């Protein structure tokens, strides 16, 4: 399959708008993907998801004595219905534009191309899972991903690569917490001493929370949204803050989680509560991940590609597979830029290149199982 048919398939996927919370739209695209996977020889199962779009799992046969390869992709996007009206699929100067094209409908396209045209041998079965909720943290697919990971030999993730095309061998874990403060209301001018300011207490906590940060270790905390109070002449009885946490290691994630759950109020008469947690564990650059990348690098050279590796602060479903101990390579998607942005695009000439790489990995990677 050459670039024009791949572009035609990619355009079809992009024109099927699929916001993460729009089940009818997701299921229409999921149905199309299921059909395309069956046409390529997959035994396809649509996994019901009452909370959103059904997930699509395709199994391609291979030797029964070895564990399968797991390929992960998602077909939901951050773009609302109707975005195509102002951000249409278009081709300009070697680039293709459109909502969700880079993150990650181009990744789905290269798998569909690779499995149909380029994978000439299967040293093991290939399981491809396309999910509908990655962009909102994979709430309904996480358990499924982890269960499949425990049955497989390695995972390849079709997310976009680094800006320079590097594969991703490490990702930060992602935590979301809500800190709520209860105080006591009082008239700010008549009897302020009878009040207990939830906002003052929250201010103390915000300063202490940021002290937990360890930039050298790659651990960041950000209080990104705060709320509190009712009007200026009332001592505020409630306040809250949304906290974003990123960590490069499970040990650091556990340190931060324990610290946040152990915080104590410093303002007498106020109470704290903390909820949330890490919705994606860190994808650590383990020896198994390094070994998989080194194989990929050597395979890339046979295709004329000099593959490099990198780390990123964003999370993906590869975080889940790696945390189970499964060797995982991420960032195998198509070159481009503008994920979640108005200029989202892919570099067209990289479509066949990344399809060939994916096919070679599925044909040549060797992992004990």
Image (cartoon, grey):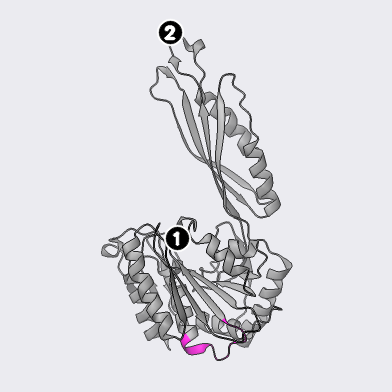
Q: Are marks 2 and 1 in contact (CB under 8 Å)?
A: no
Identity of the residue drawn at 37% across and 57% down: 21
Above or below 223: residue 57: below
Please provide percent x and percent y for residue 255.
69, 45
Q: Marks 2 and 1: which is nearer the front?
A: 1
Identity of the residue drawn at 45% across and 22% down: 236
Question: Callout 2 environment at 10 Å: few (<14), some (14 to 19), or many (20+)?
Answer: few
Identity of the residue drawn at 36% across and 73% down: 31
- Residue 248, labelled with which disc? none
SS category of the residue bearing label 1 = loop
Residue bearing mark 2: 190
Q: Residue furthest right?
A: 287
Question: Callout 1 environment at 10 Å: few (<14), some (14 to 19), or many (20+)?
Answer: many
Residue bearing mark 1: 133
Q: Which stretch is magenta?
A: 116-125
Does the magenta stretch mainly form a helix, a strand or a loop? loop
Q: Does residue 325 appear left or right of residue 314 in this picture? A: right
Q: Quadrant of the N terminus?
A: bottom left
Q: Is residue 336 visible?
A: no
Q: Quadrant of the C terminus?
A: bottom right
Residue 157: name its quadrant.
bottom right
Q: Earlier in the sequence, mark 2 or mark 1?
A: 1
């Amino acid at each position: 399959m050459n670039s024009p048919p791949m572009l035609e398939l990619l355009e079809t996927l992009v024109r099927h708008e699929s916001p993460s919370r729009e089940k009818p739209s997701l299921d229409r695209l999921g149905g199309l993907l299921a059909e395309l996977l069956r046409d390529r020889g997959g035994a396809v199962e649509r996994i019901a998801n009452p909370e959103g779009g059904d997930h699509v799992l395709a199994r391609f046969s291979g030797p029964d004595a070895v564990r399968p390869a797991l390929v992960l992709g998602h077909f939901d996007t951050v773009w609302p219905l109707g975005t195509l009206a102002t951000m249409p699929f278009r081709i300009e100067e070697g680039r293709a534009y459109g909502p969700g094209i880079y993150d990650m409908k181009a990744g789905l396209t290269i798998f569909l191309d690779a499995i149909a045209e380029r994978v000439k041998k299967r040293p093991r079965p290939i399981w491809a899972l396309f999910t509908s909720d990655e962009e909102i943290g994979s709430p309904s697919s996480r358990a499924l991903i982890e269960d499949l990971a425990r049955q497989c030999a390695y995972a390849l993730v079709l997310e976009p690569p680094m800006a320079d095309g590097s594969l991703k061998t490490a990702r930060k874990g992602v935590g979301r917490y809500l800190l709520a403060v209860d105080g006591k209301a009082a008239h700010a001018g008549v009897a302020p001493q009878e009040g207990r300011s939830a906002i003052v207490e929250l201010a103390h906590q915000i300063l202490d929370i940021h002290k937990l940060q360890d930039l050298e270790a790659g651990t960041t905390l950000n209080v990104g949204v705060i709320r509190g109070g009712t009007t200026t002449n009332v001592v505020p009885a409630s306040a809250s803050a949304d906290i974003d946490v990123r960590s490069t290691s499970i040990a650091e994630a556990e340190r931060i989680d324990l610290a946040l759950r152990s915080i104590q109020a410093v303002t007498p008469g106020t109470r704290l509560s903390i909820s949330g947690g890490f919705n994606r564990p860190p994808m650590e650059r383990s020896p198994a991940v390094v070994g998989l990348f080194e194989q990929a690098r050597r395979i890339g050279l046979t295709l004329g590609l000099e593959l490099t590796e990198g780390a990123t602060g964003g999370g993906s479903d590869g975080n889940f597979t790696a945390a189970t101990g499964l060797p995982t390579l991420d960032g195998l998607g198509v070159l481009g830029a503008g994920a979640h942005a108005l200029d989202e695009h892919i570099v067209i000439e990289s479509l066949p290149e990344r399809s060939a790489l994916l096919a070679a990995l599925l044909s040549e990677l060797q992992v004990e199982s």
